[in-house]
Image (cartoon, rainbow, N blue to C red):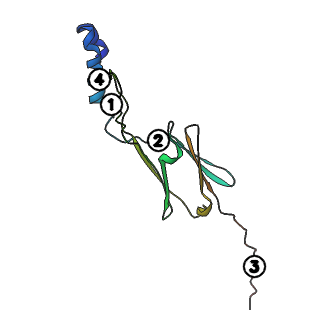
Amino acid sequence: MYNYKKAYGMVPRSFGGILEDMNKFFYDDNWSNTTAPVNIKETDNAYEVHVVAPGLSKEDFKINLDDNVLKISFEQKEETKTEDGKWLRNEYRFRSFKRSFTLNDTINTEAINAKYNDGILAITLPKKETTEKASKEITIA
């Protein structure tokens, strides 16, 4: 990666921002979708999937269950607002993410629920109630 800070001493101060912007343009990952960080916790009764996604609303998310694959997605459209003044710097980017998780047959798919609070999307995947089958003695004829 180019050390633009070292170059600041060799160019006039007014060019410093240009070097930084060029460095970010060529070396930052601005072209790909982001992957939202996920934590998964198991309790006695459920699995909990926590997706870190601050600054959104619950209506922004799409959660689907298709053939035992839980799909979580969000797509943010780039806003084009016109306001008075001239932007000196605009770092808002188009961002989206998609995550998929294959569920096993221990999940009660009819009882899955989700909440979005304080930037965390929490999806609860309740486990099916397991009943121990009674042992049956087989008599030998």
Q: Which label sits in the foreground, 4 or 1?
A: 4
Q: Which mark is residue 36?
A: 2
| Percent of width and height locating residue 50 | 56, 44
Q: Tell which of 107 and 113 is nearer to you.
A: 113
* Mark found first going from the N terminus, 3 or 1: 1
Q: Is residue 1 visible?
A: no
For the residues bearing labels 2 and 4, Cβ distance under 8 angstroms: no
| Percent of width and height locating residue 37 | 49, 40
* Mark found first going from the N terminus, 2 or 4: 4
Q: Residues within 10 Å of mark 4 (few under 14, many from 20)?
A: some
For the residues bearing labels 4 and 1, Cβ distance under 8 angstroms: no
| Percent of width and height locating residue 77 | 38, 42
- Which residue is labeled 3 in the image? 136
Question: Is residue 80 left or right of 59 when viewed as pictured?
Answer: left
Whole-Å distance between the Cαs marked 2 and 4? 25 Å
| Percent of width and height locating residue 118 | 58, 37
Q: Element under label 1?
A: loop
